[in-house]
Image (tube, helix red, strand yellow):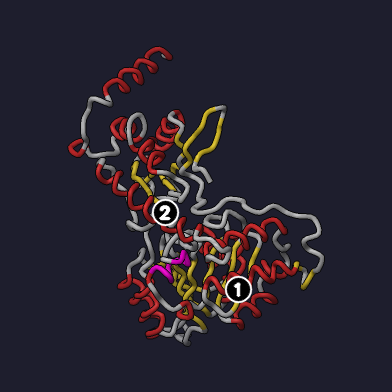
Amino acid sequence: VSGRIKSSGSEMITLYQILFLFILTYCYKVNVYPFLYKNKFYRHEEMEELAAKFLGVESAMAFGMGFATNSMNIPALTGKGCLILSDELNHASLVLGARLSGSTIRVFKHNNMQSLEKMLRDAIVHGQPRTHRPWKKILILVEGIYSMEGSIVRLPEVIALKKRYRAYLYLDEAHSIGALGPGGRGVVDYFGLDPRDVDVMMGTFTKSFGAAGGYIGGRRELTEYLRSHSHSAVYAASMSPPVVEQIIASMKCIMGEDGTTLGRDRVQQLAENTLYFRRRLTEMGFIIYGNNDSPVVPMMLYMPAKIGAFGREMLKRNIGVVVVGFPATPIIESRARFCISAAHTKDMLDTVTVPPCLAQNGYLFHTKDIKSAHSWSCVIPFFHSFFHSIASSS
């Protein structure tokens, strides 16, 4: 992984692809898969066993699409008479899955344990509307790293609450698996918690593993139930063999089972890159959201009119970055989202944060504090050429 791509003949530093650790490392080989088992090749079974070992759970099962892993499995786990407590900033796949389930949905404030506990307490005291019967099941939906905020879930407190009120916990680690914790095992590893305290562990293979699809991990009874009740398991096709090989190769690398320290080194490098890039943006006066250890770095642009122009100006400087606005964010909280990778070098990150990139764009779009700027001298030539080009075009 180089951290660069080529577009229209020029080389570009890319910070919009969420490929934290690996890209494709294995290719399909003819005659590797001579046997099928339950509509799967034996390598699928090996991949699921490896995923369970990596997560520290009894069993795991894989699905061909990350979005469907949430949207199709939540309806299999809850239904009418059940209550879902969902973080207000949960991903659309979690929101859709909750709606499709037919459960009652209540939304608590983002990462706010007082809000969550109040809803849990009210649910226990009052029960279902009108009948006041006890809820059949209470399921808490949270993410490890929130993709638009860069914040990390307060997992120890969530687990304490779910135990106190006897609820179930569904943890989406799409953006944290392979990217957090000493062993890259996600937010559970990051806090040093017991994986058995999380009832449903979900994640995707699209980020740190450079592949496709998602997984569900937990007790064996959970995965066996989903194999026969989840639409994503019953009606969808299995992963293609090359994708399975990529997942196995990258997961073994992270676990150190390939005989090298490459995976561990990349997890460490990602952590160092994240801290360095966040510190540089803060020193330059930009307003960024999220936890300091999160490789998802949202930088605030605020007004929706800025996001298109900011993205184009960065692209002109050969920097690829995602710009996000309403409805993915509140209407006056538009932002640019940088996704840091282990492949980014210090020189690459410095290239992004020095003229003629973020330093000049920060002044141009009023996204940084002028008082914290080092100097206007690097910006004046850019302003001159920028406004001259506008005048010429008009």
Between residue 371 and residue 7, name the one nearer to us: 7
**Residue positioned 38% across, 74% down in the render:** 158
Residue type marked 2: Gln
Residue 288 position within the rendered picture, expressed as x and y whole percent measured from the top left: 32, 48
What x and y, as percent, mark residue 119? Answer: 37, 75
| Distance between mark 1 and mark 2 Cα atoms | 28 Å
| In the foreground, 361 or 81 | 361
Q: Is residue 71 visible?
A: no
The outermost residue toward the front is 259
Whole-percent x, y for residue 26 in the image: 66, 54
Residue identifier under label 1: 60
Q: Is residue 320 above or below residue 293?
A: above
> Which of the two labelled residues, at mark 1 and mark 2, occupies the earlier sequence position?
1
Q: Is residue 49 above or below residue 245?
A: below
The image quarter containing residue 374 is top left
**Residue at the image point whose x is 52% and y is 51% from the top:** 19
* Mark 1 or 2, closer to the camera: 2
Image coords of residue 111 (percent x, y): 35, 66
Asked if labels 2 and 1 touch by Cβ distance under 8 angstroms, the answer is no
Q: What kind of element bears circle 1?
A: strand
Queried whether the magenta region covers residue 79, the answer comes back as no
Outermost residue to the left: 371
Examine the rendered structure and indicate whether residue 209 appears above or below residue 35.
Answer: above
Dot 2 corresponds to which residue? 269
Identify the magenta region: 183-190
